[in-house]
Amino acid sequence: AHTREYVEAVLNGTLSEFQIRKIGFPYSEALVKRSLATVGGALAAAEEALRSGISGNLAGGTHHAFADSGEGYCVFNDLAVVTKYLLTIEKVRRVAIVDLDVHQGNGNAAILGGRDDVFIFSMHGAKNYPFRKPPSTIDIDLPDGTGDKDYLAILKDYLPKVFAFKPDMVLYQAGVDPLKEDALGRLSLTHEGLQERDRLVLKECRKHGIPVSLALGGGYAKPIDLTVEAHIGTYKAVREVF
């Protein structure tokens, strides 16, 4: 998923100032450890999902990292790494990424776009970062202020297209930044709307008998308690469905 040169630059501390600015975090050993742990957690969660049907990583969803660079607070792209790993070792034949973070997964699209064994579905803010959006399999651009009713109706319409692909594995980027109170989201979902979003995705996975692994994704509400509550809501939905 990433070039050897980029990985070595991250590990050895030889990223350029420009590369570090694109990532958005100052470089440190702690950042490297966190980035490696995020990918490790995603791989472990995916393996557990294949065994038990459901799992999640309380980090990750770093969908803005490209093969040769980081961006948007993302160093390594855990979703792309997991997808390529599972396909390479032939644990699965087809992977679907359901990306419901408010920001389009430009790194996912750049690394995995065009493959016939990967389906990327992204619902995101039309006018939000990233401003150049490489094409996913399906991209849904939502206007500012989209609320629960319209959001959930669109999701219900499009989820069947994801499962028509007949994936062997679903990676669910469950970002909570569509929340109305989110500082960067520009959408207007409630906590109840986000939890219903999660239920819809999880119920479809369970109905079709497809393992699903969750990634935490974004969340920037103030106070931070609102973001924490929304992430907890995702795992409440997991308990309800599974």
Image: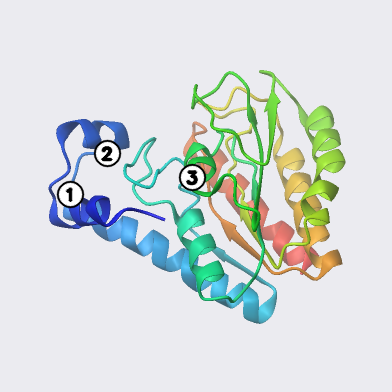
Judging depth in this view, the residue of 36 and 192 nearest the camera is 36
Which three-letter amino acid code belongs to the residue tagged 3? His
Q: Report the disc number at residue 57.
A: none
Which image quadrant: the N terminus? bottom left
State how the image is colored: rainbow
Q: Quadrant of residue 172?
A: bottom right
- In the drawing, does residue 214 fall left or right of residue 160? left
Give the numbered dot on residue 63: 3
Which amino acid type corresponds to the residue marked 2 in the rendered image? Answer: Phe
Name which residue lies at 17% across and 49% down.
Answer: 28
Amino acid type at mark 1:
Ser
| Residue 175, percent from left and from top | 58, 44
Which circle, 3 or 1, is nearer the viewer? 3
Which dot marks residue 28? Answer: 1
* Quadrant of the rendering where the C terminus is positioned: bottom right
Q: CA separation, marks 1 and 2?
A: 9 Å
Local packing at callout 1 (Cα closer than 10 Å; few below 14, some 14-19, many 20+) is few
Q: Earlier in the sequence, mark 3 or mark 1?
A: 1
- Numbered mark located on residue 25 in the image: 2
How far separated are the C-alphas under marks 3 and 1? Answer: 21 Å
Tag 3 secondary structure: loop
